[in-house]
Image (cartoon, grey):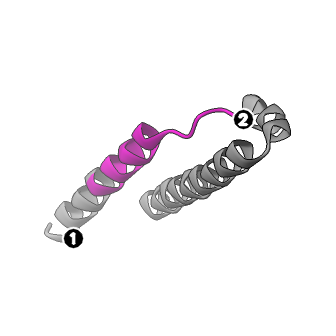
Amino acid sequence: MADMEFLRRLLTDAELELKYMEMYQEETERARKDNAGYARLWDMRAPSRQRIRDDLRMIRRVTMDIERGLGR
């Protein structure tokens, strides 16, 4: 059951990073239209595609471990 909780956390983390990526892109578009929008953009960190990839890799590893455990 701990594996399932870990998977849930990884999925949540990846989902939040994707939402942040969308928000960052929206702010970038606003900043292009309005120079005052750059102030908020400077305060934001750049979204991390690598973080999402890492989460997905860990999800694959954990699910493979779960599958191996079911075969025993």
Q: Nearer the viewer, residue 21 or 53?
A: 21
Where residue 30 sits in the image (x, y, percent)? 73, 50
In the depicted structure, whether residue 59 falls above or below residue 51? below
Answer left or right for 45 relative to 49: right
Q: Residue at x 55, y 60 (%)?
A: 15
How many other residues sit within 10 Å of disc 2, few (<14), some (14-19) or many (≥20)?
A: few
Q: Nearer the viewer, residue 49 or 55?
A: 49
Q: Return the residue at label 2.
A: 44
Where are the magenta residues, as a range? Answer: 44-60
Of helix, strand and loop, which mostly describes the magenta segment? helix
Local secondary structure at mark 2: loop
Q: How many marks?
A: 2
Instruction: Identify the mark at residue 70; answer none if there is no mark.
Output: 1
Q: Nearer the viewer, residue 8 or 54?
A: 54
* Mark found first going from the N terminus, 1 or 2: 2
Where residue 32 sits in the image (x, y, percent)? 68, 44
Q: Residue at x 49, y 54 (%)?
A: 10
